[in-house]
Image (cartoon, rainbow, N blue to C red):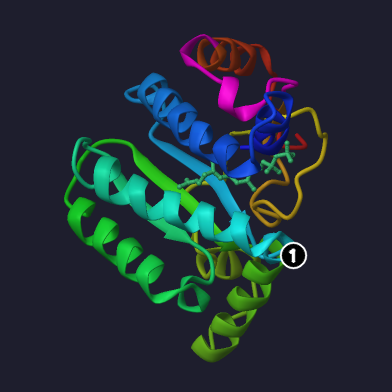
Amino acid sequence: MDGNGRWAARRGLPRPDGHREGIEALKRVLKALDGRVPVASFYAFSTENWRRPQKEIKAIFALVEELNEKYLSAETDYAVNFFGDIDALPASVRRSVETAREKTKNNRGMLVNIMLNYGGRGEIVRAAKRLAESKAEFTEENLSAMLYTGYLPDPDLIVRTGGEKRLSNFMTFQSVYSELLFSDRLWPDMDGDDVDKIIKEYGTRKRTFGR
Ligand code: FPP
């Protein structure tokens, strides 16, 4: 969900206002995806984002709590999960994450994952430790099962908005055969039409998985 900061700067607004608008975009995108894809994952905060100003970090966490309380847990049929080092987050965010997981766990709609304090390399290291502890054989399949996403298929498509053309530590293990789509749109500008175009574009891709 890249481009929130630039969206705000172009309007002479503080960066957190871009993140707030990013939540509105997230709601639009979720609505457009609902019923068309079974799983959708969103990168909200990376393990590298701690280098940002405190004020901005606090604003992002506050938005996570707000989204959980006012929207995800209440109004929708999504089953919401969070991937990342949640234990290292402030207590109120941890509580909010737990509540959202708990409240939505029996929901039968789309699986919505939010990557929070997440990094793909860190996820691989965590998985390797868990696999070593489990004493299971070191195979790709067993390592994959130890990732946060262990119970999910690898992503078919990864979309990055905001014009940058890199994955920035997103699903490092899982992304090897994902289709990639880079859009110049800033995240807060995303809407249902963009989702339609993305799904159409995905339909034109030929996936061979190396075969
Ligand atoms: C990248 O834009 C965006 C982020 C680092 C945060 C995304 C967060 C939200 C949409 C709000 C919280 C999310 C949830 C799911 C509750 P940027 O700040 O790097 O923008 P820039 O590249 O234009 O500076």
Q: Disc count in the image?
A: 1
| Residue under the image location 64 percent in, 52 percent down | 174
- Magenta segment, which residues? 183-193
x, y percent for residue 51:
74, 64
| Residue under the image location 52 percent in, 17 percent down | 195
Instruction: Report the quarter where the C terminus lies.
Output: top right
Q: Is residue 190 visible?
A: yes
Q: Is residue 148 left or right of residue 120?
A: left
Quadrant housing residue 121? bottom right
Q: Which residue is mark 1?
A: 51
| Residue under the image location 81 percent in, 41 percent down | 166
* Residue 122 vertical placement versus 71 (above, below): below
Q: Is residue 189 left or right of residue 211?
A: left
Closer-to-camera residue (54/110) = 54
Can you tell me which quadrant of the image ligand 1 is in? top right
Q: Is residue 187 magenta?
A: yes
Instruction: Report the quarter where the N terminus lies.
Output: top right
| Residue under the image location 32 percent in, 50 percent down | 68
Quadrant housing residue 199? top right
* Residue 68 vertical placement versus 177 (above, below): below
Q: Is residue 89 left or right of residue 166?
A: left
Closer-to-camera residue (60/155) = 60
Q: Is residue 47 magenta?
A: no
What is the residue that sits farthest to the right in this orientation? 165
Q: Is residue 151 visible?
A: no
x, y percent for residue 24:
44, 29
What is the residue that sits farthest to the front in this orientation? 12
Residue count near mark 1 (Cα–Cα under 10 Å), binned few <14, some 14–19, many ≥20: few
Amino acid type assigned to the residue bearing label 1 in the image: Arg
x, y percent for residue 164:
81, 34
SS at circle 1 = helix
